[in-house]
Amino acid sequence: MKQDRILRECLRISREKNLAHPLRSKGWKYIHWSFIIQDEKIISVGMNRDAAIEVILPGRKDGRKIHAEQDAVRRARNTLQLSKHWYMVNVRLNKKGLMRNSAPCSRCRSISEWLGMDRIIFTINEGWATWLNPYEHRRKK
């Protein structure tokens, strides 16, 4: 039942952040949110956004995007303990706050496998689905 509480909390946070997010005014239809969960606590929240190419070349944008999963992992780098079990929750909502498909892309799944994540729980139009890491059983306990 702890997982149900976590999913409700991720959905609540996503709805709060989603409604008035500045990317809405830039024409983004959907914003993905990714939450990293360890010890049944949210330790990181990431979102899809423009890549920070401006750090290298000020004033330049090249259209690249950072995926929410990548952003969440980057933000958790100082708190995430890779030797312990952890998982990710992905949420995507439309403008009305209804759940939409937030399945991770193949690149984000590969990063998750490599880092040893247990699973990714993600929204679909009808509720929730889960992707299990096929390599998780290889991790040292």
Image: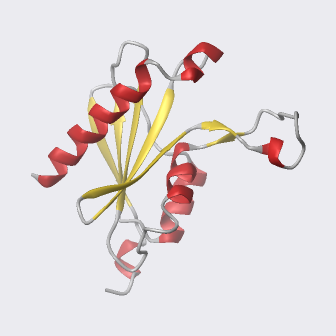
Q: Residue at x 24, y 43 (%)?
A: 7
127 vs 137, left or right, is: left
Q: Residue at x 54, y 18 (%)?
A: 29
Q: Residue at x 43, y 68 (%)?
A: 80
- Depth check: 10 or 55 in front? 55
Number of callouts: 0
80 vs 108, left or right, is: left
When the figure is inspected, residue 85 is found, relative to residue 127, above or below; the finding is below
Measured from the top left, where is residue 141 in percent x and y? Answer: 31, 86
- Extreme residue toward the bottom, this view: 140
When the figure is inspected, residue 124 is found, relative to residue 117, above or below; the finding is above
55 vs 44, left or right, is: right
Measured from the top left, where is residue 25 in percent x and y? Answer: 60, 13
Measured from the top left, where is residue 95 in percent x and y? Answer: 43, 14
- Depth check: 106 or 46 in front? 46
Measured from the top left, where is residue 33 in percent x and y? Answer: 45, 38
